[in-house]
Image (spheres, rainbow, N blue to C red):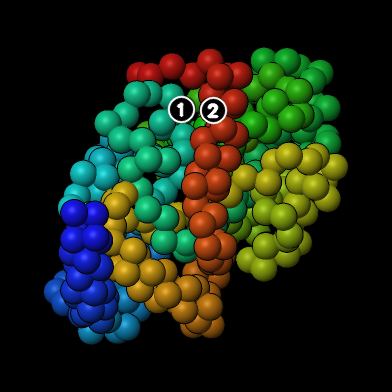
Amino acid sequence: MAVHWNRLLAAAILIAAPLANVAAADYPSRPLRLLVPFPPGGGVDLIARVIGTRLTDAFGQQVVIDNRAGGGGVIATDTAAKAPADGYTLLLGFIGPLAISPTISKLPYDPARDFTGLDLLASSYHIVVINPSVPARTVKEFIALAKSQPGKLNYASSGSGTNLHLAAELFKMVAGVNLVHLPYKGAGPAANAVLAGEAHLFFGSITSSMPFVRANRLIALAVTSPQRSPLAPEIPTFAEAGVTGVDVPSWYTVVAPARTPRAAADRLREELKRTAENADFREQLGRQAIEARTLAPGEWPAFIKAELDKWGKVVRAVGIKPD
């Protein structure tokens, strides 16, 4: 009986192998959907549309951009987690719903369990700006001022629990200063608050902040990138300013639902790696102060775990609670 079943198993394997090869060769055979957790027009949407165009050209199949805004990115992320694991639904994942929100609230998905990483990682860094009325012109001067007036200075954020909120809280922890949090409904209103003098400090976008810095309407203290930004080469990094541990990017990554067929996932990884290495693609992102790279094979689980651990510590230290 054992011999009989072994022969059946061997026959099944021989039949399945060419079928699997055919499936891999045929993928993709219809349009793909790329879910985006924010409305059209922003930085996340820009990345999605560039990636979508390049995958469309590579596959000969349309990649449909599906903007599902709401819930700080949770709605689109949950939709992707529950989509059929067939290789035809992808998500442009963002640090907020994948690494920050899960440390604050119980969500209907588990970032480490419910997604297959496809190894593309795009990172954008921030610039710390202050209103010119603040009597400081360097990071060290600002820290000294804040320590001399604990609780007197404040910072604006794009909302409680957002990546810009936690970036500022990480700075507070590292620098040992007491700043008051002023949450706004989005990065735009927060930046306007600093421009108007309602708030003192803000972790802003390099591309949108530098025109105001060069017009002397904002003072730039440092960038959060490991090296100086080509868009703001005159602004030091935090490390150059004497503060380590504030290397905090906003990152974006392409993921698929867990249990996506390996052949489809490998095909996607291959094209995304080729995209990340393309000079035109890198230049397009570079104009928005975004850098693209690929994770090493199998690095996604360790990457997302490390991010959840890092931001979980900040959330616990600050005592952020669900709204």
Q: Position of residue 79 (x, y in %)?
A: 21, 45
Q: Which residue is mark 2?
A: 312
- At x 55% / y 66%, what residue is drawn? 293
**Disc 2/disc 1 C-alpha distance (Å):** 5 Å
The amino acid type, in three-letter code, at marker 2 is Gly
- Per the image, label 1 sits on a secondary structure element best described as helix
Q: Is residue 233 left or right of residue 119?
A: right
Q: Position of residue 132 (x, y in %)?
A: 68, 40
Q: Is residue 109 left or right of residue 4?
A: right
Q: Position of residue 235 (x, y in %)?
A: 74, 56
Q: Is residue 215 left or right of residue 235?
A: left
Question: Could you say which is closer to the camera, residue 171 or residue 48?
Answer: 48
Question: Could you say which is closer to the camera, residue 294 or residue 24?
Answer: 24
Quick check: can you spot residue 309? Answer: yes
In the displayed structure, 318 sits above or below 111; it is: above
Q: Position of residue 160 (x, y in %)?
A: 44, 27
In the displayed structure, 111 sits above or below 253; it is: above
In the displayed structure, 196 sits above or below 151; it is: below
- At x 30% / y 68%, what residue is drawn? 264
- Residue 103's disc is 1
- At x 40% / y 64%, what residue is drawn? 47
Quarter of the view holding residue 306:
top right
Labels 2 and 1: the sequence-earlier one: 1
- Rate crowding at label 2 as few (under 14), some (14 to 19) or many (20 or more) other CA atoms within 10 Å: some
Q: In the rendered structure, are the residues bearing label 2 and label 1 in contact, judged by CB atoms less than 8 Å apart?
A: yes
Q: For the N terminus, which image quadrant? A: bottom left
- Rate crowding at label 1 as few (under 14), some (14 to 19) or many (20 or more) other CA atoms within 10 Å: many
In the displayed structure, 147 sits above or below 297; it is: above
The amino acid type, in three-letter code, at marker 1 is Thr
Question: Could you say which is closer to the camera, residue 49 or residue 275?
Answer: 275
